[in-house]
Image: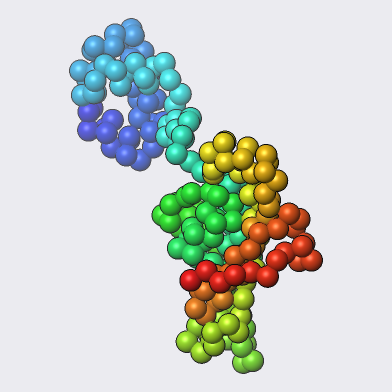
Amino acid sequence: MSILYHELREIEASKARELVRKVLAKNNGNVSETARILGISRNTVRRARDGNLEDLSRRPHHSPNKTEHSLEELIVKESKRTGFRYRRLTSYMQKKYGIAISENTIKAILRRNNVKKKTRKSYNGKHRPLYDYEALMPFSEFQLDTKHLLDKNALPKEVYEHMKDYNLPLYEWNLIDIGTRTRFTAYSYELGSVFGPIPSASF
């Protein structure tokens, strides 16, 4: 009888629990006798008697390490927009949004959302990378990113208060050369190219 129970358990859990209930009924609800006949524990008998026939979901009710849905959406959106993969996207999220998140987490998010590497089509219809990094000349392709310095909690509270008290610039501009990764940084009071000063190189 114990072999039958375990065979049913492998095939379909609900059938195995039905067997437990039938044996339990024939033995007038005697848990110990049912467990002996089927070769299972008394706790297993009680679970079959008191619980559902079907297996319960093993998904945890609370996942403290799971990335918030809004943050996951932002990562997917930025990856599709920039074409960055997990390594460059990690640095990008830190610099633009002040969000520190591991490469492995971003990699898992991109895989989970089936985000493919961004490509461009060549003249013959075949896909090629967004940039030909081997042939890319220095300072021929740039990417511009802006960051609102007061929109996150990446810095201590007193730093934000200091910026407000002394009327410091609220926006950071980063102009990045795709080929050499040289970064030009500037700051402004308003988010508009008219108000941005000429950036100074940061090597």
Q: How is the image coloured?
A: rainbow
Quadrant of res 139: bottom right
Residue 93 drawn at (x, y percent): 55, 55
Task: Tell me what residue is drawn at x 62 percent, y 92 percent.
Answer: 124
Q: Outermost residue toward the right?
A: 194
In front of the other: 54 or 131: 131
Q: Can you give x and y, in whole percent of width and height, for residue 179 in the image?
A: 52, 80
Residue at the image point whose x is 20% and y is 24% from the top: 39
Quadrant where the N terminus is found in the figure: top left
Asked whether residue 198 is in view, the answer is yes
Residue displayed at 49% across by 59% down: 91
Q: x, y percentage for residue 125?
A: 62, 87
Residue at x 53% of width, y 38% of height: 156
Residue found at the far bottom of this picture = 124
The residue closer to the viewer here, 67 or 161, is: 161
Instruction: Let me know if residue 72 appears in the view.
Output: no
